Image (spheres, helix red, strand yellow):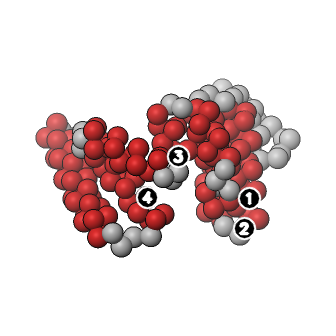
Amino acid sequence: MDLPSTTSSPSGLSALARRRHENRERTAERLTAVIDTGLLPTKLHEMAVCYLAKAHRDLGRTAYSRTGMQHVADGGGRLAHLARLAGDFPTALTAAENLGWEGRHHRVEGDVRWVHGDIADAAQAFGAARREGEEHGKRGEAAMPQATRAFILAFTCSRAPAVAGSRQPVPAPPR
């Protein structure tokens, strides 16, 4: 079945943007209703507040977004993510180190280092995240940082190792 293209015209892009805005609006309404019940455990409450703040950000409600993010940061939750978004590199790294396995500390450290251009240390952190995922039997948690590691190593040179830990270079593509 052929589906009509909604992105081939300015009106199609407008429709997509409108739909995204409506989705964010609906998400914000639902999250607000859930948060207002007061029935969520602390960690889930923080997560809901964080996602509500992101929805407010996407809707252009900067003051609401900032208030929600600050609430989460004040409670100690998602501090690495929030510090990274604010450009506070030292705080983001310190918070990432304290996350432990459950908080995916190596992957978060890799994310922070990668966006700050520290490619070698980001690759090392993603490699550690992959190994930790394997140790815990979590294939997805092993695959995701490995894929990110391969992606960022592709920026270092055309002969980056194909597999983590491999000393065999990838052959240069034919010209």
Q: Up-down: is 55 above or below 151? A: below
Residue 2 in view here: no
Disc 3 secondary structure class = helix
Quadrant of residue 150 within the rendered picture: top right
Mark carried by residue 46: 4
Residue that numbered label 2 is attached to: 136
- Identified at 58% across, 39% down, the residue is 92
Looking at the image, which is closer to me, 79 or 149? 79
- Identified at 63% across, 46% down, the residue is 96
Residue that numbered label 1 is attached to: 132
Residue that numbered label 3 is attached to: 79
The picture places residue 67, in percent across and down from the top left corner, at 33, 44
Is the residue marked by circle 1 packed among few (<14), some (14-19), or many (20+) residues within 10 Å?
some
Name the amino acid, label 1: Glu
The picture places residue 1, in percent across and down from the top left corner, at 26, 64
The picture places residue 66, in percent across and down from the top left corner, at 35, 40
Q: Earlier in the sequence, mark 1 or mark 3?
A: 3
Q: Nearer the viewer, mark 1 or mark 3?
A: 3
Q: Earlier in the sequence, mark 2 or mark 4?
A: 4
The picture places residue 160, in percent across and down from the top left corner, at 74, 35
Residue contact at pointers 1 and 2, CB within 8 angstroms: yes
